[in-house]
Image: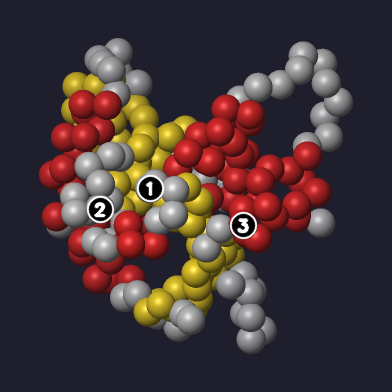
Amino acid sequence: MDRLYDFEEQLAFSKGKRQKTDTATIQQMIAGCVSVEIAPTEMDRAGIDYIAILRGGAQIFIDAKARDAGCSQYWKDGPELALEDWSVIPENGRRGKVGWTLDEGKQTNLVLFTFDLQDTEQCFLLSFQLLRVAFRHNYRQWREQYKNDTQCSNGWRSHCIFVPASAVFDAIQLASTGVIGAPTSNPGDSNFK
């Protein structure tokens, strides 16, 4: 069953109530962070919500993903991360758009996953590129193993897979480990042929 979401309502939520707690959380979690700025509109449209500024001047681009209150009622094995495989599902002659989790053009450095306090106080700050690689490597298995949901918003449908954070951490650990000089074939590519 498709869930209906109003994009503008979700944006207002993330820009309102969450901004203050997100900026404080980011500054506390990133060593050397002296400030957190709200990304300008053009960066926000590209999936960057915040810019963390380090003492040495480096900028870290962060995408914030907040779950609605009550999501924990669906959890089977602790907090779940909503990983989007389709931002726009290809259907009815409409060309699809890959979800943010698989977007190879995305300029985000980190992803901040937060939840309503009634569900958990935990939050997670993950490397976007390692998350993308881990999702790609495990895509077929996770799509079969975990809950999937389609959401409707402004005339298009998107699709997410809800993966336990513990499984994501394990997959990132594997994606972070390789063999020097190994062949260049990517095992995750077979998930998309």
Scheme of colours in the image: secondary structure
Residue at screen point 16% across, 43% down: 21
Q: Does residue 42 appear to the left or right of 36 in the view shown?
A: right
> Vertical placement of 97 versus 93: above or below?
above
Q: Is residue 79 visible?
A: yes
Residue sitting at x 50%, y 73%: 150
> Residue drawn at (30%, 36%), measured in percent from left and top?
51
Q: Is residue 81 left or right of residue 140?
A: left
How far is disc 2 from disc 3 in space, using C-alphas? 23 Å
Q: Amino acid at mark 2?
A: Asp
In what quadrant of the picture does the C terminus appear?
bottom right
Distance between the alpha carbons at the discs numbered 1 and 3: 16 Å
Mark closest to the chain's N terminus, 1 or 2:
1
- Residue that extends furthest to the front in the rendered view of this protein: 76
Task: Report the residue at 52% width, 40% height from top.
Answer: 168
Q: Residues within 10 Å of mark 3 (few under 14, many from 20)?
A: few
- The image position of residue 47, as x and y in percent, is 41, 51
Q: Secondary structure at mark 1?
A: loop
* Amino acid of disc 1: Pro
* Residue that mark 2 sits on: 119
Residue 144, percent from left and from top: 65, 60
| Residue identifier under label 3 | 145
Q: Nearer the viewer, residue 33 or 131?
A: 131
Dot 2: what SS? loop
* The label number, if any, that marks residue 79 in the structure image: 1
Query: How far apart are labels 1 and 2 at the CA level?
Result: 8 Å
Q: Secondary structure at mark 3?
A: helix
